[in-house]
Image (cartoon, helix red, strand yellow):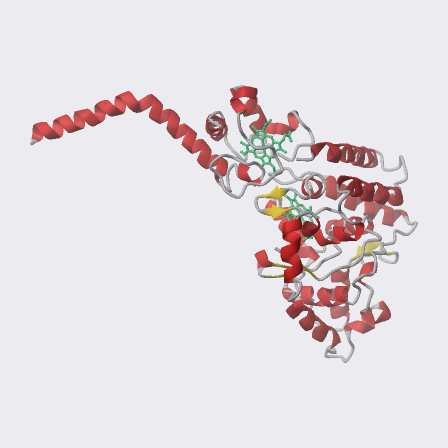
Amino acid sequence: MPSRLFTKTALALGLCLVAAPVAQAQSAVSEGQRLAFDRSKGNCLTCHQIKGGDLPGSIGPKLENLKLRYDRNELVAILNDETTRNPQTAMPPFGRNRILTEQEINAIVDFLQTL
Amino acid sequence: MRIHPALSFLAAVLALVAPAVAAPAAEKPDPAADAKAFQDFFRKKFPQVKFEDFVNGPYSMNEDMRKQWEEKEQFPPYEFALEAGKEMFEKPFKNGKTYADCFANGGIGIRQTYPYFDDKEGKVVTLELALNRCREANGEAPYSYVKDEMAALTAYMAYTSRGKPFDIKIPDDPRALEAYERGKEYFYTRRGQLNFSCASCHVQNPGERIRAEILAPALGILNAMPIYRSEWSGMGTISRRFTTCNSQIRGVPLEPQSEEYRDLEYYLSYVSNGLPISGPGARP
């Protein structure tokens, strides 16, 4: 009995070790998605169509294939304060106005890069 | 997304507002030219919308919604408020007088002339404010600006003015021009944690969806007030709508009928001159 328990535990641990980097990346992505969809956080669906989200608005463009057009820093900058690129934009300055923390913006960018 | 035409208009407006802020004495504002540019902007942006139709807010922007609305208008959800408003309007105060005693033409068919600039007071007077002043002058307690009683009274007064074009005057009085300019500046100034101006939504993005809601154009945006909103399951006054829009952007709403809101209403009504009163309205 004890030995079987031990093997099971060891197996589980082993799996964990192997899967860790992938799992971590996935959890950042899903955390980013959660933050992007949460109405009291990013609430990005208010303006953007995003894969996996319901009732999107149409003020901004559909968010897709972002990796082809923007590197990570550019996406962070857009979230931080899009008015620097376009002074008239309707998009809120999430970083500048502290709607989202740096960490939250990073998680959302992880998610954006999968779109 | 229709960013570009809005941009050029906004840029033009900002150019107009900015110097006025920086150097008040510089150039005399020209509300008539303003209103024309404002109306032309919307006509050009929505060539398929008939001019009188702009008073129908989101319904003027979307065919499907319009059909639902036309069906709804067969049994208008504001009917109840309208009946209550008529009764309230006609019922004498404790002192025997009525609302009719406070207004030109007994208060019938005059909605389109509000707000007006009161030259004795040197300030803008809206219909909601005038109604409460009437109550107080007759020894009655004022109503809440955001609740049902005020909406019922303004619903009835709007109804008796249906079809009459907005006829807002800006007398040749520097204080009236200033009030107008302040209202305009408020409308185009970004605020709140989300950094929106009224124009971000109602000039740059009318017809677009913000979540499931279709944004109304700023042209004619007050003509249908007060409105029954299914989302509120009740009526809303202009005061209620202004404070709600301010809260939505995580801004701090002003006091209803504060001077800023009155000036804002003055600006928005003036630039809709010529469009018919259509209130009370129904909205999703």
Q: Is residue B124 above or below residue B159?
A: above
Q: Position of residue B254 (x, y in %)?
A: 67, 50
Q: Residue A84 is drawn in which quadrant?
A: top right
Q: Is residue B258 left or right of residue A38?
A: right
- Residue at (70% x, 74% y) in the render: B88
Residue at the left extreme of this rendering: A1
Q: What residue appears at the point 57 percent right and 61 percent down from the top-left corner?
A: B233
Number of disc labels = 0
Residue A83 visible in the snapshot: yes
Q: Residue furthest right?
A: B172
- Residue B270 in percent (x, y) is at 82, 50
Depth check: give the residue in front, B178 or A104: A104
Position of residue A71 relative to residue B174, above or below, is: above
Q: Quadrant of the N terminus of chain B?
A: top right
- For the point 86% across and 50% down, which residue is it? B176
- Residue B251: image x %, image y %? 62, 44
Instruction: Give me the residue at 72% from left, 56% from top.
Output: B257
Looking at the figure, which quarter contains the C terminus of chain B? bottom right
Is residue B254 visible to us here? no
Q: Nearer the viewer, residue A37 or B18?
A: A37
Q: Is residue B92 left or right of residue B1?
A: right
Q: Nearer the viewer, residue B43 or B88?
A: B43
Answer with left or right where residue B271 lies relative to residue A23.
right
Q: Is residue B284 left or right of residue B31?
A: left
In the rendered image of this protein, does residue B26 appear above or below residue B229?
above
Q: Quadrant of residue A34?
A: top left
Residue A38, position in %: x, y?
48, 40
